[in-house]
Image (cartoon, coloured by chain):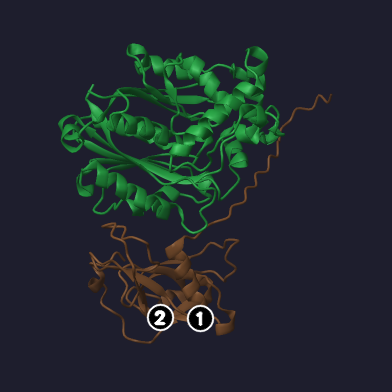
Amino acid sequence: MREVALVAFAQSPSVRQDLRRNEVEILTPVIAEAIRWGGVPRKEIGFTCSGSCDYLAGVPFSFVSALDAVGAWPPIRESHVEMDGAWALYEAWVRLQVGDVDSALVYGFGKSSVGDPRDISVLQLDPYYAAPLWPDSVSLAALQARALLQSSGYTERDFAEVVARSLRDAKRNPNAQVSGDFSPDELVKARYDVSPLREHDCPPVSDGAAAVVLAAGDLARKVCERPAWIAGIDHRIEAHSLGARDLTKSPSAALAAEKAGMGKGSLDVAELHAPFSHQELILREALGLGESVAINPSGGALAANPIMAAGLIRIGEAAQLVMDGSAKRAVGHATSGPCLQQNLICVLEAR
Amino acid sequence: MSEESLTVLRSPVKLEYTFTAGETSSRFLRGFAEGKILGRRCPECEKVYVPPRGNCPICTSPMKEEMELAHTGTITKFCIVNLPFAARQIEIPYVSASILLDGADVPIFHLIQEIPYDQIRIGMRVEAVWVAPDERIPGMESITHFGPTGEPDVDIDLFEDADA
């Protein structure tokens, strides 16, 4: 495999509702910052790939207008996934394996505030059996959380501990939307949103964007003092039908981690894309993450969740720690679909 | 339970959005309420965009210089529409055209009226027809259509460089 590394990461602060700027206007300074840090001139970037969702934007082909932020004339090699930007990163990594280009710009963006993401997410379900029941994303996550409580030793207080730790860590993240000191004992006194989930167990609605620059081999060494090398990357998916899955486990995350070689060395940090608090518990178990691994020092998706960028942000945050020297080996994880249906693992390391 | 098999399932989908036009487009749309067509010029490649963009889509330079464009322009291409559709209550056939406003480098898209559809041609000079001042809104609907100015046609080869 060709050596590929993240050499730059930029993100917008996540906000509840940006009434001033449209998606392109949120994205433009983020891409400019990533390119500035990446050290590869814009015109020399070999491949561009984005992740976003027209249903979220409520605009057909919204990703095309986003190209205004990139500068796509004369024509560039460009692609898009109707997924989180983490999967755009995967496509760019595959593209760099071909060997004819040495760099890629990857971005993800989403204004979750323009519609109701709880309802919009229903449209990703099968249209015959699941979608007509209109089970919103929080209700489905609550089904999963309930199943977890009943099949494991976890309690609602364990969920609250994930929240308290995430929001405390988010105080050090200038891009976080929600942060602060909360005690798990107080959190569990809050009323349910959809039982057994409380509002704090659910991600905030966020507007935001993120971008990374990838570079291969010698180019990465040239433009970045300490590139975050991609030691392995893989993504796996489970059945579409929720009834066909054991929602309390994440075999797709476990398989992706195995294929990405996550277990080949010790990890300093894991940035997990767990939009709901209980999902972190499921992922920790699937990935076999012990106490020695720092989980979500950024605060994770409970602190900021711009849909279609939040997974890419996990990889970017993990890479940032490798690039600034505070981690030697880190993992960035992204999820997609209802109840952790699809999972991507990106193992990053210093060399 | 009925033995009749289910043959049709109605599953209505309705989503509501609060669309944000954005900083640059908001200024453009508000211009129509004042009877203005606003564009912006790229400081690097000097192209004039209408609708304006916050940054140049070609070189990504921020575009700050706002300018008012002429209400006259030239048809660079057009389409004769023969199919009615619900959102546009207008007698068919009618013509939608790309119109390069004088001073602009990209065309806008609008309706051509006041002339039989089969007499419309590329290179024809047209001007904006506005609704009455007190009926103007922050939107392109403030211009009902473009109609012929009566000036001589323009040689279309002049538009080779324009993204028209």
The quadrant holding residue B126 is bottom left
Q: Is residue B39 above or below residue A11?
A: below
Task: Please tell me which residue lies in front, A237 or A178.
Answer: A178
The quadrant holding residue B65 is bottom left
Q: Which residue is mark 2?
A: B71
User: x, y (%) of residue A18?
Assistant: 51, 53
Chain painted in green in the figure: A
Task: Say what secondary structure mark 1 lies in.
Answer: strand
Cα–Cα span, label 1 and label 2: 10 Å
- Which numbered disc flags the more N-terminal residue, 1 or 2? 2
Q: Is residue A310 left or right of residue A141?
A: left
Residue type beneath disc 1: Trp
Mark 2 belongs to chain: B
Q: Is residue B24 visible?
A: yes
Q: Tell me what residue is drawn at x 37 percent, y 30 percent.
A: A318
Task: Please tell me which residue lies in front, A304 or B70.
Answer: A304
Task: Please tell me which residue lies in front, A181 or B41.
Answer: A181
Mark 1 belongs to chain: B
Q: Tell me what residue is drawn at x 46 percent, y 27 percent.
A: A272
Residue B130: which numbered mark, if any? Answer: 1
